[in-house]
Image: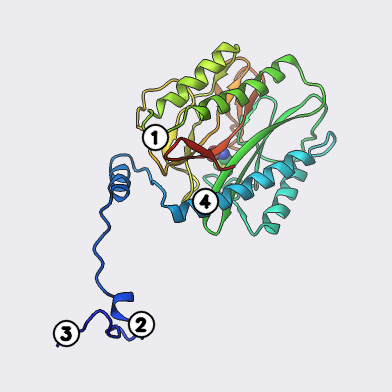
Amino acid sequence: MSISRNDPCWCGSGQKWKKCHFPQLPEQNEETLLRQEYLKKYRIILKTPEQIQKIKKACKISAEILKKLCDAVRPGMTTLELDHLSMKLHHQYGAKPAPLGYGYPPFPKSICVSLNEVICHGIPDHTLIKEGDILNIDVSSIVDGYYGDCSAMVTVGNVSEDKKKVVETSYNCLMESIKILKPNIPLSEIGKTITRVAHENGCSVVYQFVGHGVGLKFHEEPEVRHHANAVHIPLAEGMIFTIEPMINAGSADAIIDAKDKWTARTIDGKPSAQWEHTVLITKEGYEILT
Ligand code: MF3
Ligand code: CO
């Protein structure tokens, strides 16, 4: 006896066999082959159109939360108050903050807030934000299981020349490195562009922290180095990653707080700044998702 495609499925679902357990041949179009190649060769997940839609939504929400947090900054408030607002906003958007409980030791708060000489991974606490400060707010949100990641700088009142310089230069580093993105250029072009812009402006590039693939997980392959490097993986349509250059006024070297194991500061105490976007590589070039 044999069943035909339109018969009820043998599993008892009541659906037609062709809609249920009918054996499917794997799709073998160009996209699937490229996806398999990138996964095998580089452990990079090229996203499907369905995944892209979900990640876009997560990115949009991260960006909106980030905008609201930046707008809320006032001298005299603590960085902990920003964390509380972030918790509230994540809840309102039906999102989860990815940093909370992440890594080891578990990151204790919902966002990173990095003031002045803090390069990244600053932990919100009772520190007062004051006139003359610069701060980075880093928001990573999980929406429906998908991830978005972005950060921005806020300047509080009048800031020193060095601080102004790192804030502007890190922004230009990010945007110049985004402008060049398109399929087939080597990943290393990002670090090359960032290093050029930083050095032209008398700044140094942090090499101890990197951008990263993002979307299905918080941190995926590839590592996106911001300094000059030799990782020449060709970009491909469907890649989603962050670029998040950390730019210093003095030495490039970072030291991690011995007590909290997270806060990274410049070794010389000079200011540092960072901006971050999540980007998608498209057929034509790129799309900024945050
Ligand atoms: N954008 C930062 C990163 O990708 C966010 C760090 S959150 C933390 O590393 F929990 F890891 F601190
Ligand atoms: Co990131």
For the point 49% across and 37% down, which residue is it? 286
Query: Quick one: quadrant of the N terminus?
Result: bottom left
- Mark 2 near mark 1, Cβ–Cβ under 8 Å? no
Q: Is residue 107 visible?
A: yes
Quadrant in the picture for residue 273: top right
Mark 4 neighbour density, 10 Å: few (under 14) some (14–19) many (20 or more): many
- Mark 4 near mark 1, Cβ–Cβ under 8 Å? no
Gap between marks 3 and 4 measured at Cα: 43 Å
Q: Which residue is mark 3?
A: 2
Which amino acid lies under the numbered mark 4 shown in the image of this protein? Ile
Mark 3 neighbour density, 10 Å: few (under 14) some (14–19) many (20 or more): few
Q: Nearest to the eye among marks 3 and 4: give it.
A: 3
Q: Which residue is at the front of the view, 18 or 222?
A: 18
Mark 1 neighbour density, 10 Å: few (under 14) some (14–19) many (20 or more): some
Gap between marks 4 and 2 measured at Cα: 32 Å
Q: Earlier in the sequence, mark 2 or mark 1?
A: 2
Q: Which residue is mark 1?
A: 183
Query: Quick one: quadrant of the C terminus?
Result: top right
SS for dot 1: loop
Q: Which residue is mark 4?
A: 55
Q: Earlier in the sequence, mark 3 or mark 1?
A: 3
Gap between marks 4 and 1 measured at Cα: 19 Å
For the point 82% across and 39% down, which residue is it? 77
Instruction: Check residue 15 in the rendering and tell me which mark sits there, or answer none.
Output: 2
Relative placement, left or right, of 82 versus 206 is right
User: Residue 5 location, x and y as percent?
Assistant: 25, 79
Q: Earlier in the sequence, mark 3 or mark 4?
A: 3
Which amino acid lies under the numbered mark 3 shown in the image of this protein? Ser
Above or below, comparing residue 97 to residue 123 in the picture: below
